[in-house]
Amino acid sequence: MRYDDMVAAARREITEVTPSQLVDLARSGALVVDVRESGERDQGAIADSIFISRGLLEGAVATAITDQDVPVVVYCASGARSALAAQTLMAMGYRNVASLAGGFDAWKSAGLEWGPPEGLTSEQRTRYDRHINLPAIGEKGQERLLDSKVAVVGVGGLGSPVAMYLAAAGVGTLGLIDDDTVDATNLQRQVAHNVNRIGQAKVDSGRATIDGLNPDVKVRTYRTRLTADNVLDLLTGYDVVVDGSDNFPTRYLVNDASLHLRTPVIHGSIFRFEGQVSVFDPYSGPCYRCLFRQPPPAELAPNCAEAGVLGVLPGIIGSIQAVETIKMLLEIGEPLVGRLLTYDALSQESSILNLNRDAGCPACGPAEPPELVDYDAACRATR
């Protein structure tokens, strides 16, 4: 069947509305969906319209419009593609669908209000195209990532892949917290740094890497170690905290601060050939101290310099932390809340352990969050 015949057949099955009728429908709560291509949308759009290009409609609309009874009006440039789109939506079960007769051209000719499209720019749609094509993310999800703020504690083995992948994903603001400088021994695993930055502050090296990766991302750097005196000031305002630290005192302090701020923590740790990841969502699941009440003595907590670590292992664990961060920011999937993922690189085996909140936990058990203290420096791993 020729395209014109397909459009004509669709128009016999659907309802078409005029621009003035669309104004009334939108005021009454109808959703307006723009099914043009991104290049067309860049030239202008109807205010508050949802952008789902015609080629992605079947895969993306169920996430964008969950209620199949809500009134929906689709539009394109001239009304042909939107007629076919309306027909498709009706076949998918949407019960109150119409197409804008004459499309965006008719809207403009009627002298009705339009302007630059809200949301992503054309360049951003190109950059994040693979995200936008995912029904669970889409353009709205990508906008949400760009509006998100994540603090990364430690710009070392774990913090490097976390920061780089979150930057590539378009998380709009990253806070990098680390007081250390780049050392030659870091380069076996800390991929945010390079030989030209030996001696440079890790937060500055990390910022340079992110700046070269994605100019959309704002990087805040804090060249300091977290302490009981500064932890709340440094972590306030972030949606998620990623703990990539390499010492127990910092892990415990981040945990306790998260209970004060009610900010989720994406935990990761590595040791030789093994790694762990969990998500500690304050008061919704267990916290770090539900698992490990107190820091271990120094002799039971060797660091990477003493015990060694497989160079690619932090890339694996850090990437999983980045995935969990995005899931928490977008509220998609099943984050590792109340679960601990363990990974063994030598056997290539992983497992998930179910965790429960400990009613007797000294941190999240009481009604009030714990007092913030600096934990025993003897437990702090040396670098």
Image (tube, rainbow, N blue to C red):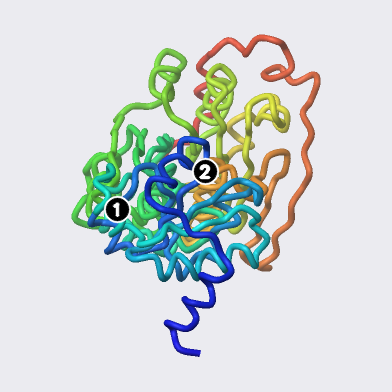
Cα separation, mark 2 vs mark 1, equals: 51 Å
Residue 126: which quarter of the image? bottom left
Q: Is residue 22 above or below residue 265?
A: below
Q: Spot the residue most to the bottom.
A: 1
Instruction: Answer whether residue 91 is visible to the viewer in this image.
Output: yes
User: Residue 66, how many percent across, how many down?
Assistant: 63, 49
- Residue 7: x, y in percent? 47, 76
Can you identify the residue that label 1 sits on?
193
Label 2 crowding class (10 Å Cα cut-off): few <14, some 14-19, many 20+?
some
Q: Residue at x 60, y 47 (%)?
A: 332
| Residues under numbered marks 2 and 1 in contact, where contact means CB atoms less than 8 Å apart | no
Q: Quadrant of residue 357?
A: top right
* x, y percent for residue 56: 48, 67
Dot 2 lies on which element?
Answer: loop
**In the rendered image, which residue does mark 2 sit on?**
30
Residue located at (35% from left, 62% from top): 102
Residue at image position (74%, 21%) is: 361
Q: Nearer the viewer, residue 303 or 208?
A: 208
Type of the residue with mark 2? Ala
Q: Residue at x 53, y 20 (%)?
A: 261
Question: At which x and y percent is residue 8?
Answer: 48, 77
